[in-house]
Image (spheres, rainbow, N blue to C red):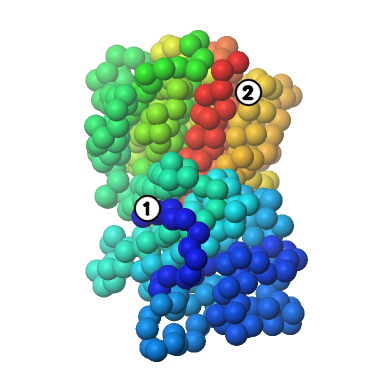
Amino acid sequence: MDVTTAPAPAAFSPVDVLVLTVTEPPQPLTGPARRADRLLEGLISRAIDDGEITGKAGELILFHTPPAAGGQDSAPRRVAVVGVGDGADHLDWRAAGRAAAKAAGDLKAETVTLAAAPSDGPVEVGAFVDGFGTGAYRFVKFKSDAEERPSAKLTIAGGGATPSDLDHAALTVDAVNRARDLANSPANHMTPLDLADHASKLAADIDGLECEVLEEPALEALGAGALLSVARGSELPARLIVLRYEPQTVARESETLGIVGKAVTFDTGGISIKASSGMEEMKLDMAGGAAALEGAALIARLGLPVRLICAVPAAENMPSGTATKPGDVVTAMNGKTIEVINTDAEGRLILADALAWLTTQGASRLINFATLTGAIVVALGEVYAGLFGSDDEWLQDVRRAGEASGDLSWPMPLHEGYRPLIESRVADLANAAKKRQAGAVYAGMFLREFTGELPWCHVDIAGTGMVDGKGTGFGVRLLLALAQQLSLEK
């Protein structure tokens, strides 16, 4: 993302769009807003008086500026006034950024300047930059007639954000948008092998980040029968993609953050095949893996003092003569046997082996992201992810990171009364229950069986990670906020 900072100018520059922010309710115009109102001959203040500008977060009103004196191009072509709510919520600033990006895109603007007030600090300006960069996102790679349209160059004039703050925000935008690219890519262009190649390129570009890809012979030797069982119906092999980050300095010497992300690059449901309507969206079933990889890489790129290891199990879930059948029993890496009741409950199988593997690799705490259950969508919709945890303190850490980052999650129960739902008559565990109840909960109960004694959280992003058939990048910002918490010495 192209964003720069500049001192508050004495006069407006000739940009395509000048963005001004107003709170709800609007306050008397001062500084750049007052100057812009004079430039527009009082149009802004009249719009406020008439109730057309309310300051509601994301509400944007666009004004054309009058011709400059003498015909010289010395003023912005347009002025956009956008609301930021009461100004205290960073999510409102992000909404303002998204609105500004949409307006700039519609106008095909090349240059945009945010006139920030002195009180607009790194949090507010950073959230605006985040909203602008992610709001400008377009996935047009496979449109042959797509117009080449680079995102507008954004300048922050004034305010309290430093160039370092803006770099941080821009790198976050890039990571979120790359995660969206991965999830949005068609399954024939984003296979388990392609995802592994992407991870290798990430590691090659970032100091301290290393990539290892475990192929099927190595997985067989490790006893990863759950992961391998999901890939049996596909001609494409499974992979366990591993990123390790060893910073130069570590804030907490005893801590290693273990990250897992589900990457089913296409999910037909296997033998328990899904309905055809909407199945094309199942390319998005690797959104958790995309967030895990990009989140881990962002932590390393920013040089945070947090040791981490990220494991992303990747596979296709396809029906064929070699596919796992309902009723089959497979053995996971930790030795637990699993009766596969439903082959469309495959995400928890591949996560089981990745979680079990991380317990042997020195991780001190675990978090996983997965588009796991339709049940969590029914329960929480597209606003909150479901949050499950084996340790109350760790669960609250993750929840706080969600609140700080905007990747919101809501705690869900893991009560022992739900255990019968994962019991099998022929194996240690069943991957699905015959009773249609608490689907998101018993999926979490199942995953907990593979986490050893480590503090662990499961974030079910089925409702938040893929919305209206598009990847959102949910989880990248949460991982960054979590790593920032762990960067603080105890």
Q: Is residue 368 above or below residue 137?
A: above
Type of the residue with mark 1: Met
Residue 461 % position (x, y): 55, 42
* Residue for badge 1: 1
Crowding around mark 2 (Cα neighbors within 10 Å: few <14, some 14 to 19, many 20+) is some
Type of the residue with mark 2: Trp
Q: Which mark is residue 394?
A: 2
Q: Is residue 9 above or below residue 448?
A: below
Please give the name of the residue rendered at 62% of the width and 72% of the height, measured from the top-left corner: 34
Q: Which mark is residue 68?
A: none
Image quarter (top left, top right, bottom left or bottom right) of the C terminus: top right
Indicate the quadrant where residue 223 lies: top left
Q: Return the disc, 2 or 1, that comes first in the chain's sequence.
A: 1
Mark closer to the observer (2, 1): 1
Residue 428 % position (x, y): 54, 16
Q: Secondary structure at mark 2?
A: helix
Please give the name of the residue rendered at 63% of the width and 52% of the height, measured from the top-left corner: 119
- Depth check: 477 or 340 in front? 477
Indicate the quadrant where residue 443 lies: top right
Residue 218 visible to the viewer: yes
Q: Secondary structure at mark 1?
A: loop
Please give the name of the residue rendered at 44% of the width and 12% of the height, measured from the top-left corner: 362
Indicate the quadrant where residue 231 lies: top left
